[in-house]
Amino acid sequence: MSDLMPVERIESKILLIRGQKVLLDRDLAELYQVSTKAFNQAVKRNQSRFPLNFMFQLTGTEKNELVTNCDRLDKLKYSSVLPYVFTEHGALMSATVLNSERAINVSILIVEAFIRMRELLMNNAKMTEKLKDIEDRMDTQEMNTIIIMDKLRALTNPTQNKTQKIGFDAKK
């Protein structure tokens, strides 16, 4: 199935919008090899399959921000239509409304891409936690080294290590 297309190609199309990883309607249509118009019509005919947590329409501000930040979406700037975006579940559900062999195969790759991204994020969080732990240990070691160095300096510095005379001083 990976001969259909590399999973990395799908991963590169996944965006973070409103705190969710999503795919644009135009990107899904391209992956499924249908026009964006035909794709959105199929979704609209089956709107009951797409609750808000499966898909939502971008606002004008979100669209403009997307066009500004993603060079590959430059053509979207000239569209008067606000695009729809699909979460992982919405992307999977869209394959069912297209009902083609390609849609089924691509939907499996889409799920694999989302899973890989989730794993990368989890690994990144674990790595960040490990780095913080190492940093904390290094800070502790550094403090211990400073304390030891201060004590060694005090022992080896004769100006700080004055000897006190014992006995009676007749000069006073």
Image (cartoon, grey):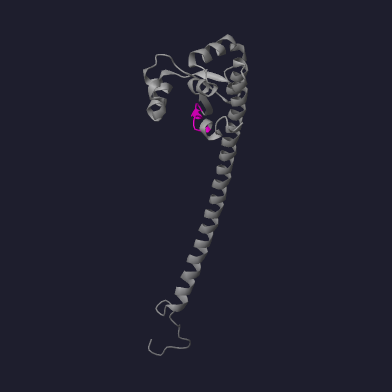
Number of dots carrying numbers: 0
Q: Residue furthest top?
A: 45
Q: Residue 81: x percent and y percent?
A: 43, 14
The region drawn magenta spans 11-18
Residue under the image location 44 percent in, 16 percent down: 82
Q: Nearer the viewer, residue 82 or 33?
A: 33
Q: Residue 86: x percent and y percent?
A: 54, 22
Q: Is residue 120 left or right of residue 74?
A: right
Image: 154 above or below 117: below
Q: Residue 103: x percent and y percent?
A: 59, 21
Image: 28 above or below 161: above
Residue 50 visible to an observer of this rendering: no
Q: Nearer the viewer, residue 118 or 95?
A: 95
Task: Indicate the quadrant where residue 46 lies.
Answer: top right
Task: Indicate the quadrant where residue 136 lies.
Answer: bottom right
- Queried whether the magenta region covers residue 12, the answer comes back as yes
Q: Is residue 164 left or right of residue 128?
A: left
